[in-house]
Image: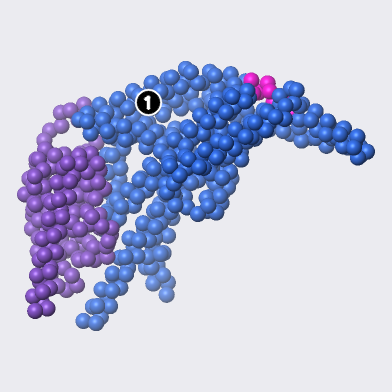
Chain colours: A blue, B purple
Amino acid sequence: MFPKLFGHYLFKSVFMLLVFITIVTLLAYILAPLLIPIIVSFVLFAVLEPVSGSLQRHGFPRATASLSVLLLLVIVTVLAVYLLLPQLSAQLSVLKTQVPIIWQSLSDFAQKISEQISAFLGLDIDTGKILEPVITQGNVYAKKILLQASNFLFSLSFMLVLIPIFTFFLIRDYRNMRNTLLDALPNRSFELGWLIYHRVAHQLQEYIRGIMIQSLIMTLVTSSGFYIIGLQSPVLLGIIAGVLNLIPYIGPLLAMVLPVLLALGQTPLDLWLVLYAISVLLIAQLIDNAIVVPAVIAHAVNLHPVIVIIGIIIFGNLFGFIGMILAIPTLATVNIIFRGLLQGLKTQDIFASQNAGEAAQD
Amino acid sequence: MYEKKAPLWYNFFRPAGDQVTEVTQLWMNTPLFEGISYSKCRELVKNMHPRQYQKNETIFTSGDIGTSVILIHHGSVDISAGDKLLAELQSGDFFGEVALIIDEPRTADAIAAEESELIFFLRSDLEEWIQRSPRDGAQFMLNLSRVLAARLRHTNILMSLQVG
């Protein structure tokens, strides 16, 4: 019974998938300090490779095409550093000074409510006491998050050096590296390996391009919305909303937290601003779901929503924010590899048993 | 894959590989590359995948997922279905071209009759080539359909003879 089970295509597929996952996890563990620049470089590669490809189609040699794309990348990066980074840092510092004010305003708001309650119902609730530990904790957390954000901005400038280098070599050498790796497969699994690779690459490239466009549109829409309603740091908040939108279902909810808190932090308290901020995010979601998703993302990944949500929660728990963003492409990749293995090994099994049957009949 | 990792400057002065010339010549003699220029075919050959097979090594069996047409560079290959030998192919012959069009499993067995080098032209490379140079791609697809139509006609005649 056991040897038969081991020979079954389902068992073989699961075993090969587990080997693959183990190798990738080990590699990720070893490359941990460089993981983010590597992932970003792959994303940029997925976006820029078609540009280099079209240059090659117009007769440019591969080296020249990759160099031109790199030049484009460097120009965009330098512009981003000079224009965006100082502004972002400034907005972050503003936000830092804003944190205590936000909590003060929240506690004032709570005080007002408790006064109303005692005036109307005659109950005396000391909201100050109830809210005090919450506010102290909230303050500490908010400061921590902002500190992390500033650290991230710092490491971002370090990555800005690594990412263009990695991306250039990916654009120039990725094909050779890929071919060397896949050609190392044994003769019998060579074609199946290429088939699975192409399915994964195609779907990932579609997905990455889709979410990049989606994220950009979300950033533009929310930034302009926040600017129009007069919220502080509209660009920073827009970028955060755009990035958070990379996480399906949960991201849009997280994106509401900061703008709403900032709107609450206005002195004097302006509840209309809070309402406007929420409206901006809701309108952006509406545009996203009604126009962007059907046009750009639809069919990019074929995963059940429940799997998506569970995946995001588990990956978020294991690897934090980056894990939440990577959950969908990782799950999609595993899904395609498993289906490919299953398809390849199953048909082999069926034909083998048919042949065995025919041979027995003969 | 003939195009090995090379330093940047190497791309500009790449020496002509004998292997590439030989394989290009073999492909140019097949009906698949009729009407396609030598230089275009050569560019394509540089991205093809040569693989070595021992005598009696299975190349594929019926049921394997196929994704490429295969050219025999050196050696010979036996194509069979069950115990029946369908064809003995020599250097310069190609087989498995149906896999360039559909995702169906292979329908025959291919076994290396002697030590052989086979050149794999993958469907994904073909699709990329069609995107890159649609005119040549269309010519290739036309040639491929001629090859398949000829094979269909041949099978029809055989079947009608059997029925008759």
Q: Say above or below: A336 vs A234.
A: below
Residue occupying image coordinates x 37% and y 65%: A9
Location of residue B147 (image quadrant): bottom left
Q: Nearer the viewer, residue A23 or A68?
A: A68
Q: Nearer the viewer, residue A252 or A130?
A: A252
Q: In the image, which residues are magenta?
A: A94-103
For the question of whether residue A133 can be seen, the reply is yes
Horizontal arrangement in the rendering, residue B40 relative to residue A242 (left or right): left
Tell which residue pokes out farthest to the right in this image. Answer: A122
Q: Which residue is mark 1?
A: A73
Q: Position of residue A66 (x, y in %)?
A: 29, 29
Q: Quadrant of the N terminus of chain B?
A: top left
Q: Position of residue A149 (x, y in %)?
A: 58, 28
Horizontal arrangement in the rendering, residue A196 relative to residue A284 (left or right): left
Horizontal arrangement in the rendering, residue B72 relative to residue A345 (left or right): left
Q: Secondary structure at mark 1?
A: helix
Residue occupying image coordinates x 42% and y 72%: A2
Chain name for mark 1: A
Is B6 one of the magenta-colored residues? no
Of helix, strand and loop, which mostly describes the magenta segment?
Answer: helix
Location of residue A355 (image quadrant): bottom left
